[in-house]
Amino acid sequence: MSTPSRPQPQNSVKIALDPAEARVWRGRGIVIDLFRFSNTICALLESGRRDVRVYPSPAMALSARRTLPGSDLFSEIALGVEQYDNSPYTALYGSDPARPALSVTNSGSPAAASLLLADEILVACFANFPALAAYCRANPKPTLIVPACLFYDMKHVEDMICARALTEELEGRDAFPAALDEIHASGRVLDFLAFRPETGRRDMELVLKKGWMKAVPRIKFKAGAGLVENLA
């Protein structure tokens, strides 16, 4: 007869190493898609957007766009319609915060949608580390940090580096300087800039700065749409 597994401590934190871990997780899930999705969602809230929605697939996002006249679509995926790039800079400075914002991405939105059994789904990046960590410490729960690269391309190592730094941040230690050095050493910043000539440099200036955003996004999925609220 097997021994029942012990419940995890309220403040336990671990990093997902496989998508399957996120799909069965029932505690707090924190999604990190550092270079784009996480910062774009935070920037949309920071800009004053009150209606922000996340979709697991392009088809669902396009369907929602047809039923939400005047909405803005944010994605790095070419969807064949008028859209904004999945750009934190554009989300913050180059779009109308009065309009609904719809987000669908290669890795971040599928990562969030994988956490359907979770008690709550948060979004993290360096920019909101202090605000998010303060919220989590004030509301302890077993926590799974989900690097979005698990759902798209494991070569996007910045997500895993940021996830490790967040485990330190949640315990009151600042691992940001070492994480920043590791990300630069990986070559991923140059990769990003090479493929994003329009806003890439301005995006990266925001992405690689700690603590300048106060937004703490929480996503609640309902009928396929991830409705985003700001806990800050």
Image (cartoon, rainbow, N blue to C red):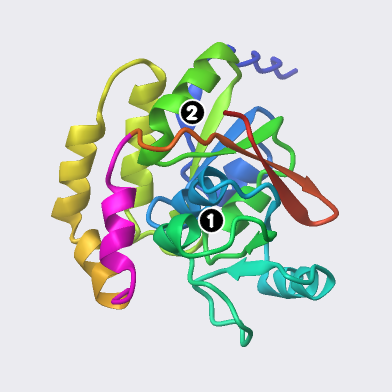
Residue 196, image quadrant: bottom left
Q: Residue at x 68, y 47 (%)?
A: 50
Image quarter where the C terminus lies is: top right
SS type, badge 2: helix
Residue 99 lies within the magenta run: no
Q: Is residue 12 visible?
A: no
Report the amino acid beneath label 2: Leu
| Place of residue 120 in the rendered image (x, y in percent of width and height, measured from the top left) | 68, 32
Report x, y in % for residue 198: 32, 75
User: Can residue 197 be seen from the camera position used here?
Assistant: yes
The region drawn magenta spans 196-210
Q: CA distance from mark 2 to mark 1?
A: 17 Å
- Report the residue marked by disc 1: 108
Q: Are marks 2 and 1 in contact (CB under 8 Å)?
A: no
Q: Which is nearer the N-term, disc 2 or disc 1?
A: 1
Q: Is residue 210 left or right of residue 142?
A: left
x and y percentages locating residue 83 in the rendered image: 58, 76
Q: Nearer the viewer, mark 2 or mark 1?
A: 2
Relative to 137, residue 104 above or below: below
Query: Callout 2 environment at 10 Å: few (<14), some (14 to 19), or many (20+)?
Result: many
Q: Is residue 218 left or right of residue 35?
A: right
Q: Residue at position x 38%, y 39% from top?
A: 127
Please name the amino acid that badge 1 sits on. Gly
| Nearest to the observer: residue 129 or residue 28 | 129
* Tag 2 residue: 132
Above or below — where is 106 with respect to 173?
below
> Which type of secondary structure does the marked residue at label 1 adopt?
helix
Residue 92, position in %: x, y?
A: 46, 54
